[in-house]
Amino acid sequence: MSRWAPRATVATVVFDGSRYLLVEERDKASGARVFNQPAGHLERGEGLAEAALREVREETAWQVELTGIIGVSLYTPPAGSPDFLRTTFLARPLSRLSGSAIDDDINAVHWLRYEEILARSARMRSPLVLAAIERHRAGAIHSLELLFDP
């Protein structure tokens, strides 16, 4: 009997007061170019917040400050893909890291207004991308104190 275990991921909604930071990447299954928050898998020995900061840095070359947690969600993609347990953070940008390269998987980094994101809604990597932004806009932000390491 196999044991079900979703993959642990993190994502970060980075908001500068009027725009959101999104990455454009190629979906490996379909080959389509899609939009996502900076996101990725948790690595062994890494905390959730640490993973979120690392993913933003690696995918966008931005240093950010985490300011809250938007939520935790379980996503079951189309058949054949594993399930994901995603912790989504909120952050504010601090500075662009000059001279830093971004992951090879990232085609472009975009600062987009909400209306521009809506216009691209059919190109989101998953429903979680727009849902996280909608939760941010609705004020569904929780304290970072929800996280603790024993």
Image (spheres, helix red, strand yellow):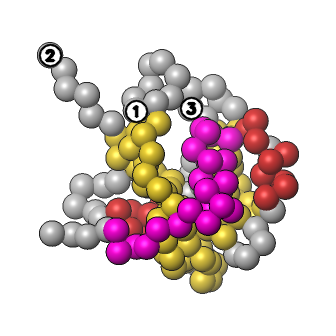
Q: Residue at x 52, y 22 (%)?
A: 78
User: Which label was assigned to residue 124?
Assistant: none
Q: Do the residues bearing badges 2 and 1 touch, measured as CB atoms within 8 Å?
A: no
Q: Position of residue 130 (x, y in %)?
A: 66, 48
In the displayed structure, 69 sits above or below 74; it is: below
Say which amino acid is labelled 3.
Answer: Lys
Which element type, helix, strand or loop, lies under badge 2?
Answer: loop
Q: Which residue is mark 2?
A: 1
Q: Residue at x 19, y 26 (%)?
A: 3
Which element type, helix, strand or loop, lies under badge 1?
Answer: loop
The quadrant of the image that shows the C terminus is bottom left
Q: Do the residues bearing badges 2 and 3 touch, measured as CB atoms within 8 Å?
A: no
The disc, 1 or 3, on the residue closer to the chain's N-terminal end is 3
The disc, 2 or 1, on the residue closer to the chain's N-terminal end is 2
Say which amino acid is labelled 1.
Answer: Asp
Magenta residues, as a range? 124-146
Q: Residue at x 44, y 19 (%)?
A: 80
Q: Which residue is mark 1?
A: 83
Q: Residue at x 85, y 45 (%)?
A: 119
114 displayed left or right of 80: right
Give the main secondary structure, helix, strand or loop, of the magenta stretch.
helix
CA separation in Å, label 1 and label 3: 16 Å
